[in-house]
Image (cartoon, grey):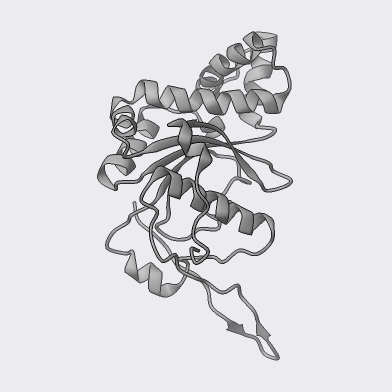
Amino acid sequence: MSRPGSPGTQPGPERTLPVPTTGTAPAVPASPEQALAELHAGNRRFVTGAPRHPNQDAGHRAAVADGQHPFAVIVGCSDSRLAAEIIFDRGLGDLFVVRTAGHTIGPEVLGSVEYAVTVLGTPLVVVLGHDSCGAVQAARAADATGTPPVGHLCAVVDAVVPSLRRAAAQGVEDIDGIVDIHIAHTVEAMLDRSAVLAAEVAAGRCGVAGMSYRLTAGEVRTVAAVPARTVDAPEPAASAA
């Protein structure tokens, strides 16, 4: 559980190929609100095509080789288009990433989250889902037909079904509305199933947020947060990467 680095300018036979410059963040966010603000700021850079690629240079790679202090845990869907360090414009050692299909949570996922929060002191846990989620669609199809999928995919479907039930009770039928409900349900489930995480949140040392990513636009939005004030995260300082 550690961190990585970045490329430099590559001279070609007749020209020099430019590579995005890297920068480093001056300080690690210390509160859930600051951490969420940094994620939103990085995502805005990604969406607008102005990424800074912070903490991806060789110097930072060496600096974090002996230890890590990530400011956010990302419990995300395994979808290949949901690479957290890219969409949040972050670098080595910034994010502690755990990914499963449909951001489903089991003992190993919860243990990884608890490690980051209690051992590494990470102040924010984010459940990251996305529109048109294949895991949610698979669960919906299996539930509608009564035909369970083969193999271990059943575990993914079973984990999503409670969210389908909640969506049905609320009259939500569109897939992206169901995804938002599933993200919020995952936030609740993590706090219900991890007494360690719940205690850190109660003590004010950590926050949990649910975020939804739009595949086409590249934007993220917060759809759930505990404590609620985490949603209204302040903007990071202009000098922050």
Left or right: 2 with respect to 14? Answer: left
Left or right: 129 with respect to 174? Answer: left
Q: Position of residue 37 (x, y in %)?
A: 51, 49
Relative depth, front residue between 117 and 148: 117
Q: Quadrant of residue 50?
A: bottom right
Task: Tell me: residue 196, above or below residue 149.
Answer: below
Q: Position of residue 27 (x, y in %)?
A: 38, 62
Task: Tell me: residue 161, above or below residue 118.
Answer: above
User: Who's the residue at 59% across and 82% down the image?
Assistant: 10
Relative depth, front residue between 123 and 95: 123
Residue 99 showing in the rendered view: no
Residue 83 showing in the rendered view: yes
Q: Position of residue 150 (x, y in %)?
A: 58, 20
Q: Position of residue 232 (x, y in %)?
A: 52, 40
Q: Quadrant of residue 49?
A: bottom right
Task: Tell me: residue 83, above or below residue 59.
Answer: above
Left or right: 114 with respect to 207? Answer: left
- Residue located farthest toward the bottom when viewing the structure as drawn: 14
User: Who's the residue at 52% across and 37% down the image?
Assistant: 231
Left or right: 141 with respect to 5? Answer: right
User: Who's the residue at 32% across and 36% down the image?
Assistant: 204
Relative depth, front residue between 183 and 32: 32
User: Who's the residue at 62% across and 59% down the image?
Assistant: 45
User: What number of labels is visible?
Assistant: 0
